[in-house]
Amino acid sequence: MKILEICMSKGFGGLELYVVKVAKYLKENDYNYSVVTKEESFLSKTLTENKISNYNLQSVLHLLPLISAIKLAIYIQKNNIDILHIHWGKDLFFAVLAKIFSRRKIKLVYTKHMSLTRHKNDIYHRFLYGNVDAYLVITKALFNDALKYLPIKKEKVHLLYHGVPAANINKDVCYEYITKIGMDKNTFKLAIFGRVEKGKGQHLVIKAVNNLIKKGLNIQLAIIGNIMDEIYFKQLKADIENNNLANNIFTPGFHNKPTSIMPCFDAVVLATKCETFGLVLPEAMRAGVTVVGTNCGGVPEIIEHNKTGLLFEPENSEDLTNQLSKLVDDKEFCNRLAIAGKKDADERFSEEIHFEKLMGYFESS
């Protein structure tokens, strides 16, 4: 079985990182595989940095998709590809054409990472999805939306949750990190991981922490991630300064191995308005940390409220304040959530189980 991973996206988000993760798995487990990417893209550079070779297709997708499809078909024929695995919606058209042009009996597997918002039942989309052999979705909501919006048979749609590796919990690493960034090991320590931009909701968490401090609760917050919006970051820093929160809120920046420091915190919060999945949550859960997330998108599938974590209403800092106060006020309750969350995540979001199922879909689709 020769597998071709293809992603022509120029982006640098979870979708592209998932392609890297799949390529790493295929390499480490000696699968016969190759990867096609867009030249000079984040994905191409990241794969190269990880010593994973990738073929750069100089795509002219938007202007002349036929040329791109012919180039890909030639690559498929030359390399005897059996499985074509795509991730980015804009790759679907030329991937389907390449499948047809290649004259090989190949299987097209499409992992859908983003939400669906409209019906696609015209002749064009019936042609596209008629050539998809397996359509993998990362949440039950996406599964239902696929059946609702797409001209695809139910037996071709499969739920495959993202998988995350088991955490390596090292108390020495935690002590060193917490000390380095200036946090107090005796306080309730909260963290938000992700790009620093308004959509990720760091401002809501700052408001909630400020509310809790005004109530006399002992809490500190670490905002961890790349600064993508400098203006927004300056606004956050101004909020911290204007509310005298410099001793309670820290901005240590990006960390290249976030899962290694998640166990350093009592809770991790995801404050995005509506995430399709929210990978940081199962990562934190497998690290034995209590999680708090927005009650929208795929997050309620990850967190069972008051049992494996807590949910709050999107963009509602008052509700977030109330949920966090449950944890700060009741350490025993916080620990129970963490234990239950870890057990659930180990069973549902194991990276090992994820790839076992993915390979199964490749072989059976």
Image (spheres, rainbow, N blue to C red):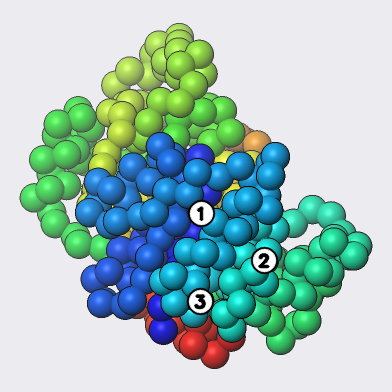
Residue 323, horizontal then vertical, whole percent: 54, 48
Task: Say which of 310 and 16 sits in front.
Answer: 16
Q: Please report whichever mark, 1 or 3, sits nearer to the chain's N-terminal start.
A: 1
Image quarter where the C terminus lies is bottom right
**Tags 1 and 2 touching, CB below 8 Å:** no
Callout 2 crowding tier (Cα within 10 Å): few <14, some 14–19, many ≥20: many
**Mark 1 is on which residue type?**
Cys
Q: Please report whichever mark, 3 or 2, sits nearer to the chain's N-terminal start.
A: 3
State the residue position of label 3. 83
State the residue position of label 1. 7
Image-based side of 285 in relation to 317, left or right: left
Tell me the tag on residue 96.
Answer: 2
Of all residues, the one furthest to the right in this rendering is 122
Callout 3 crowding tier (Cα within 10 Å): few <14, some 14–19, many ≥20: many
Residue 42, horizontal then vertical, whole percent: 41, 40
Count the numbered circles shown. Answer: 3
Above/below status of 97 relative to 245 = below
Residue 83, horizontal then vertical, whole percent: 50, 76
